[in-house]
Amino acid sequence: RLCVPEITFLDAFLSLQFDGRDGEKNSELKFTAGDALVEWAEAHRYLGCSHSNQINSNRLNSHYQTFRGVSILKTIDADAWANRVARGKERVEDSANSHPNSEENGNDPVSSWTSTEFFYDWTFASPYAGTIHCPSNEHKHNSARNNNRQIWKSLPQSHIPFHLLQDTSQPILLFDDIMLYEDDLHDNGEVSLNVKLRVMPTCWYILQRLFVRVDYVCIKCREVRICCSFEDVPIASGVDGLQKQKTQSTQQNFGKIAKSNTIYRDVTWREAAWEELGELGLPKDPKLWRDENGGNNALSQNPLAALLMKLPLVPLPNDLPAYSCVEV
């Protein structure tokens, strides 16, 4: 049995629709809490199955396995609490043996000590990277399952024109920040999934961020960047992902074109175990890993975002390319 986050905004969503060509239905790119949680829940079907090449040992907790980034973590005091529960059960069993009629009267003192271990990913670390409906491509795959992940075409490098996003001469026509779900993880940390939208005269840009903090256990950050320009624009060649933010404004090494009728997506997953933070030169105080600003700045770098960029990259699932595109 799975539980949903304490605060889930099922009515909140971000949807972008594109006019169909030659009488086709409109294409749609959307982000919803429901789709994110369904993709998270489906991954549990494969936990413990050794036949899939997408299942790997979870380096944050070697006792468990992970499938598409979904795994079952333990809190820092989980073992101590499990020992306490075991000792409590022993005392109750001894008491039950000395009073054999208690169970006949409908009172089973042993069953009252229920397990406190969660057999699901209680951090809600969904591998969700958006939902896309593209009628021109859906009929080729004859399926709309898994949020149409198969529609995205893998690319060797990022095609997002970050230099357009850095152009301060262009005004931001529309900005919005949509929270999809959040939870305090039973006072053991926090998880949040939100989507930010920016529309400029030259392009539109989406940043989805999943942030997971399990105090004294791990930090996770999964970001999905999606962009589409309104005209064909050149992009820098030989530079990957966010490195363009540092190079495109100073280098004019443009060798590829970002097409106006194509949506480009970059996906990055970063994470670190808590004991690794010191080696990475990152703080180990949980207070410094809290988003005090609530993520309301217009895609600007707040202190938490700067820390998250320093976390090491981790491999993505086989069906989730780091760089991809889809024509609409």
Image (cartoon, rainbow, N blue to C red):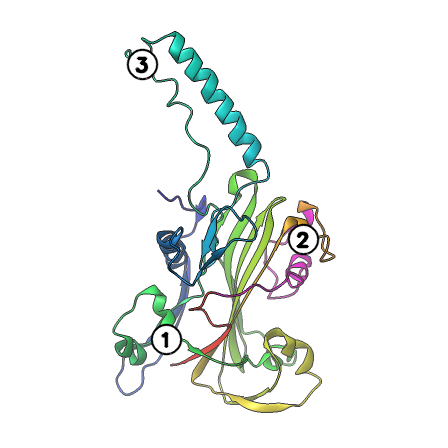
Q: Which residue is mark 3?
A: 103
Using the image as rendered, state which of residue 135 and residue 85 is in the foreground.
85
Q: Is residue 203 above or below residue 283?
A: below
Magenta-drawn stretch contains 313:
yes
Task: Tell me whether circle 3 and circle 1 mark residues in contact (CB < 8 Å).
Answer: no
Task: Tell me whether circle 2 and circle 3 mark residues in contact (CB < 8 Å).
Answer: no
Quadrant of the snapshot with the C terminus:
bottom left
Magenta-highlighted residues: 287-316
Q: How many numbered marks are there?
A: 3
Please state which amino acid type lies under the numbered disc 2.
Glu
At 39% across and 22% down in the image, what residue appears?
112
Task: Tell me whether circle 2 and circle 1 mark residues in contact (CB < 8 Å).
Answer: no
Q: Is residue 269 visible?
A: yes
Q: Is residue 132 above or below residue 284?
A: below
- Mark 1 surroundings within 10 Å by alpha-carbon count, few (fewer than 14), some (14 through 19), many (20 or more): many
Please state which amino acid type lies under the numbered disc 1.
Ile
SS for dot 1: helix
Figure quadrant of residue 39: bottom left
Q: Nearer the viewer, mark 3 or mark 1?
A: 3
Q: Image check: 64 left or right of 134?
A: right
In percent of width and height, residue 121 lies at: 45, 48
Q: Is residue 124 visible?
A: no
Q: Is residue 154 above or below residue 316?
A: below
Q: Which residue is mark 1?
A: 151
Q: Which residue is mark 2?
A: 276
At 57% across and 74% down in the image, what residue appears?
172
Q: Image check: 307 left or right of 324?
A: right
Q: Upstream in the sequence, badge 2 or badge 3?
A: 3
Figure quadrant of residue 239: bottom right
